[in-house]
């Protein structure tokens, strides 16, 4: 009895008690209970490319080096950081013309003749989640402010708070001209509003392109405006680019680190899980200037230390196969884009047919849809007034229709939740059979 009393008196750290329960825990529980067609969570139900699977299974053969099953270098397996260096060097090089025109920014730019140093400018982490947490923890001091665009991936805020930082939110708002197609790129960042939120305490700006949950791809003009703000206010940009290979033509993915003056202040985050559709492997990476990568290394070596060697070896082998195929029809990245984009367009069509107003994405594998005009018995949604409309709608749809999505309000800060309360996020990177099952259910609405 005494031990139980003492145990009840022991409280977790205050910074942990401030955290809200994860939406993913709640969704997992509800999906397990109601067994809907799950279009909410962002993972494919499609097998990875054969050469990716073989890159892992061959490591189970008796003739491989025993050291591939032991600890590897803490900043990243040598084979993997080397191929990432080769892959990203050309993408991060500052355009030669822009580089020449920006003499004052050259020292902070990734020059057109430079190479990424695989041993100093790349770090491998436990998923892109690990990259985000390590970067934020390594950079943010107590009371430092971090700019987060609403809506945002839901881990940005808790990671900032756990590092002692203060999240500052700037919303993306839809700007649609009459007759214009409703696409994700209609959601715009007001640069003047962004600038108004910056103070002497602002340290970091978090960027996500292609954007989750909106499916927006930031264009060059938008990125140049954001870069200008970062440079003038001496901000570090953490650029979450895990959906970099899923940008639908005619759009192009532009890395903000490749713009004049941005290399020295940008950490670019990628993901093996999103690159090869192996989210369960939980490998990510960050590429950036040596001083910022070193700060991340100091954090990682005293937390997780290193990442699984066999998985790093398998990802390295997979990238080595893809590297010479870049920009060809044989490239898995081009193949994946060609596979996914029609799924997104078809989902927009199907959701519109039942009365939702779907937003066509220009990248990633999510889209959002306005549910406000879809009829639901009002008495069914009035049972819990403490919940946002989109949360109640999704709960009702899961239980009564057998399809689940993610309520958009969970991607917003408390002050901006009303901006997402009439939207749901859907994942369209699923087998056609999965998607068709959902459409068959929804068309009876």
Image (cartoon, rainbow, N blue to C red):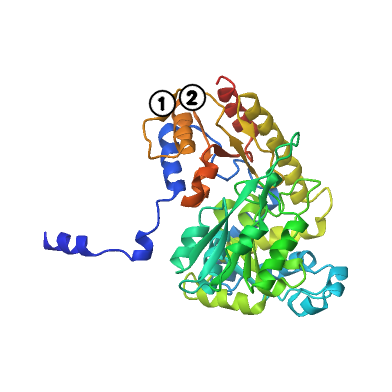
Which quadrant holds residue 283?
A: bottom right
Which quadrant holds residue 275?
A: bottom right
Question: Is 1 displayed left or right of 51 in the figure?
Answer: left
Which residue is the site of mark 1? 380
Q: CA distance from mark 1 to mark 2?
A: 7 Å
> x and y percent of residue 260 in the render?
77, 70
* Residue ID at (45%, 73%): 142
From what the image shows, is residue 316 above or below residue 173? below
* Viewer-nearest residue: 420 or 396: 420
> x and y percent of residue 146 in the render?
54, 65
Element carrying mark 1: helix
Q: Are marks 1 and 2 in contact (CB under 8 Å)?
A: yes
* Residue ID at (63%, 52%): 274
* Viewer-nearest residue: 440 or 154: 154
Element carrying mark 2: loop
Which numbered circle lies on residue 376? Answer: 2
């Amino acid at each position: 009895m005494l031990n139980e009393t003492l145990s009840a008196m022991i409280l977790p750290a205050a910074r942990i008690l401030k955290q809200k329960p994860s939406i993913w825990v709640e969704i997992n529980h509800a999906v397990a209970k109601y067994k809907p067609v799950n279009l909410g969570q962002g993972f494919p139900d499609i097998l990875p490319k054969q050469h990716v699977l073989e890159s892992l299974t061959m490591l189970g053969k008796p003739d491989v080096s025993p050291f591939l099953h032991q600890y590897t270098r803490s900043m990243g397996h040598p084979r993997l950081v080397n191929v990432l260096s080769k892959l990203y060097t050309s993408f991060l090089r500052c355009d030669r013309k822009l580089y020449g025109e920006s003499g004052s920014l050259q020292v902070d730019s990734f020059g057109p003749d430079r190479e990424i140093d695989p041993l100093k400018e790349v770090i491998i982490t436990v998923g892109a989640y690990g990259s985000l947490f390590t970067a934020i923890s390594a950079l943010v001091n107590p009371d430092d402010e971090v700019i987060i665009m609403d809506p945002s991936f839901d881990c940005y805020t808790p990671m900032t708070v756990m590092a002692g930082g203060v999240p500052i939110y700037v919303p993306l708002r839809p700007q649609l001209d009459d007759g214009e197609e409703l696409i994700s790129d209609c959601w715009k960042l007001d640069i003047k509003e962004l600038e108004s939120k910056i103070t002497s305490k602002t340290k970091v700006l978090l960027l996500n392109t292609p954007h989750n949950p909106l499916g927006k791809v930031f264009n060059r003009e938008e990125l140049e405006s954001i870069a200008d703000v970062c440079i003038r206010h001496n901000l570090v940009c953490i650029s979450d680019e895990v959906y970099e290979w899923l940008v639908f033509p005619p759009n192009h993915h532009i890395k903000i680190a490749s713009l004049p003056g941005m290399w020295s202040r940008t950490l670019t985050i990628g993901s093996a899980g999103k690159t090869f559709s192996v989210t369960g492997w939980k490998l990510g990476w960050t590429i950036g200037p040596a001083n910022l990568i070193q700060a991340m290394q100091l954090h990682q070596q005293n937390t997780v230390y290193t990442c699984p060697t066999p998985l790093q070896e398998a990802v390295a082998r997979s990238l080595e196969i893809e590297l010479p195929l870049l920009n060809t029809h044989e490239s898995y990245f081009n193949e994946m884009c060609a596979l996914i984009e029609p799924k997104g367009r078809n989902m927009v069509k199907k959701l519109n047919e039942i009365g939702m107003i779907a937003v066509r994405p220009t990248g990633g594998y999510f889209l959002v849809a306005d549910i406000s005009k879809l009829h639901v018995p009002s008495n069914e949604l009035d049972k819990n007034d403490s919940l946002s409309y989109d949360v109640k709608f999704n709960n009702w749809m899961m239980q009564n229709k057998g399809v689940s999505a993610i309520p958009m309000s969970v991607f917003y800060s408390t002050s901006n939740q009303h901006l997402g309360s009439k939207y749901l996020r859907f994942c369209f990177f699923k087998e056609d059979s999965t998607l068709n099952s959902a459409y068959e259910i929804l068309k009876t609405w």
